[in-house]
């Protein structure tokens, strides 16, 4: 981070943006706690954006996170030292999507061929992103998989603060336990009805009924490691372990008592992602996950939570932006809810269509993410 009141460079987990991070019971020197910190982002009377910010997001966040201040340049997907950030980047990303490899072992008694040593290397020079979470704070983006089964996807305007708490909260990567506006409307609001005089209330307004909140706590990492040399390794060994059937730490998130021991990030991140992408959480084999939703009747398992590389949201996707390339059939994969042919199959996109070539935050070119696990 930029130097804030003499604190010096800092990393963003668990609140170095805070004005006074102190041990409980200790005294705080107010002049030091506030110096150069609050005013770095806020103005009391002359703010230009919500929350009294001096400018709107993401521009405000990019004053540090664009390679000129913070150690993490999320705009371009690298650290200030040029290492590849694990979450990709919004403008460019250093994912070696076209250089992914794996090794094949010997077939076992059932004919299954083991897959080992999967590698998605980092690029020395980041490449332009082909998909990203849209965080400009202005443009509405479709939240695929949001809502109850059968409900249409809705539009949502995101900014950095939709997912992250800049003041710190004890959660991994200062992720908010529930992203802003991740709930969906179950019952629409009913406006008040007035008499002819426009003043007398005949029927009171009824507020919209929202879906239940789903707060997900992901334990913070001890040592902060933001970079990677292998994008297949989606876990973080610095996050406290949640232990499965053998006992130990309490199970949280998507963890089940029968699971192997796993890091607290992998065990909780699918629950976190699906606070917004609600319909995509699936805990079983794809032939058993019928959901009653025509746009996603069956789903690949997404909550295997004991190790990096298991079937989990973050195994296949990065969080900020991907530079993976999609051509031919991969380029034409339509979005959920797209028009369908008479046989019920979605009509492929063609050159010029919106979404053609979108990499959907995947880690490997041409849907090769599937082949990282499956031998076909």
Image (cartoon, rainbow, N blue to C red):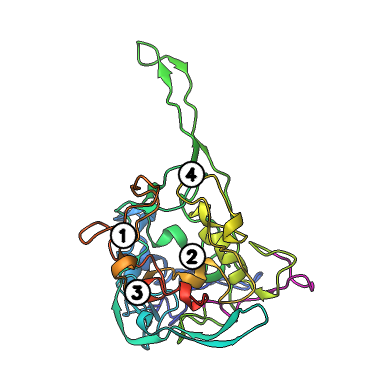
* On screen, residue 225 above or below 274: below
Return the residue at label 3: 324
In 3D space, how far apart are the residues under numbered discs 1 and 2 (Cα atoms)?
20 Å
Q: CA distance from mark 1 to mark 4?
A: 21 Å
Give whichever of 49, 85 is nearer the camera. Answer: 85
What kind of element bears circle 1? loop
Image height check: is 128 above or below 275? below
The one of 47 and 121 positioned closer to us in this rendering: 121
Asked if the residues shown at circle 4 and circle 2 are in contact, with their CB atoms under 8 angstroms apart, the answer is no
Residue placed most toward the observer, 274 or 61:
274
Start-end of magenta stretch:
234-251
The residue singled out by tag 4 in the image is: 184
Total number of numbered discs in the rendering = 4
- The main secondary structure of the magenta stretch is loop
Is disc 4 surrounded by few (<14), some (14 to 19) or many (20+) residues within 10 Å? many
> What residue is rendered at 39% in x and 68% in y?
361
Residue located at (46% from left, 33% from top): 188
Q: Which residue is mark 1?
A: 136
Residue tagged 2: 167
């Amino acid at each position: 981070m930029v130097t804030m009141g003499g604190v010096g460079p800092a990393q963003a987990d668990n609140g170095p943006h805070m004005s006074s991070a102190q041990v409980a019971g200790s005294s705080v020197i107010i002049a030091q706690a506030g110096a150069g910190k609050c005013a770095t982002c806020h103005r009391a009377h002359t703010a230009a954006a919500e929350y009294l910010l001096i400018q709107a997001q993401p521009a405000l966040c990019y004053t540090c996170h664009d390679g000129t201040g913070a150690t993490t340049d999320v705009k371009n997907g690298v650290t200030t030292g040029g290492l590849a950030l694990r979450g990709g980047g919004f403008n460019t990303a250093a994912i070696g999507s076209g250089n992914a490899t794996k090794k094949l072992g010997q077939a076992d008694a059932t004919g299954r061929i083991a897959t080992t040593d999967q590698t998605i290397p980092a690029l020395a020079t980041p490449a332009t992103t082909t998909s990203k979470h849209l965080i400009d704070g202005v443009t509405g983006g479709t939240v695929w998989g949001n809502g109850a089964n059968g409900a249409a996807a809705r539009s949502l305007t995101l900014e950095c603060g939709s997912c992250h708490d800049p003041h710190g909260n004890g959660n991994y990567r200062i992720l908010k336990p529930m992203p802003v506006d991740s709930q969906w409307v179950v019952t629409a609001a009913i406006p008040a009805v007035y008499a002819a005089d426009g003043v007398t209330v005949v029927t009171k307004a009824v507020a919209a009924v929202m879906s239940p909140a789903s707060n997900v706590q992901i334990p913070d990492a001890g040592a902060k490691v933001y970079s990677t040399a292998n994008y297949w390794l989606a876990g973080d060994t610095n996050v406290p372990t949640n232990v499965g059937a053998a006992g130990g730490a309490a199970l949280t998130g998507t963890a089940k008592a029968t699971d192997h021991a796993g890091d607290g990030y992998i065990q909780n991140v699918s629950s976190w992602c699906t606070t917004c992408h609600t319909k995509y959480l699936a805990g079983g084999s794809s032939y058993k996950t019928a959901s009653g939703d025509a746009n996603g009747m069956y789903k690949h398992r997404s909550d295997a939570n004991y190790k990096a590389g298991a079937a989990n949201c973050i195994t296949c996707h990065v969080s900020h932006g991907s530079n993976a390339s999609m051509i031919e059939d991969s380029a034409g994969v339509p979005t959920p809810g797209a028009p369908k042919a008479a046989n019920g199959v979605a009509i492929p996109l063609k050159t010029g269509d919106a979404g053609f070539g979108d990499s959907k935050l995947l880690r490997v070119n041409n849907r090769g993410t599937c082949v990282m696990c499956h031998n076909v």
